[in-house]
Image: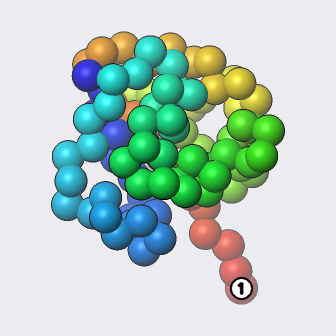
Amino acid sequence: MARVELTRHLYLYFPQLEGQELVVDAVTVADVVRELDALAPGIGGYICDERGRLRMHVNIFVGEERVADRDGLSDAVAPDARVYVLQALSGG
């Protein structure tokens, strides 16, 4: 099962995930997002837009590779993968 790590900023909005070992049963990145949303309802909409595409300021890495399919999230996730969900912060 894949292990997921979130950027610290996301725990501000989804504190129920903080301190948990996030392990998901996923074959694709889309599966990872669905599994996370089951654990913390609403996080899927925070990561993806209403069409299921990765939001502009969110990046997901599977291992050291950035997700290539930002529209369908069809990138493969191996059972022993580490998946990183990162959100850029902006401001001035």
Label total for image: 1
* Residue designated by label 1: 92
At a point 63% along the width and 52% down the height, the residue shown is 45
The image shows residue 45, relative to residue 36, as above or below, that is: below
Residue 60 screen position, x and y as percent: 54, 39
Q: Would you say residue 61 is visible in this rendering?
A: no
Residue 86 screen position, x and y as percent: 51, 52
Check disc 1 and give the amino acid type. Gly
| Image-quadrant location for residue 24 | top left
Residue 42 screen position, x and y as percent: 55, 57
Image quadrant holding the N terminus, namely top left
Could you classify mark 1 by the number of other residues whose Cα lies within 10 Å: few (under 14), some (14-19), or many (20 or more)?
few
Q: Would you say residue 17 is visible in this rendering?
A: yes
At a point 77% along the width and 46% down the height, the residue shown is 50
Residue 36 screen position, x and y as percent: 43, 43
The image shows residue 28, relative to residue 24, as above or below, that is: above
**Left or right side of 78 for 23:** left
Q: Secondary structure at mark 1?
A: loop
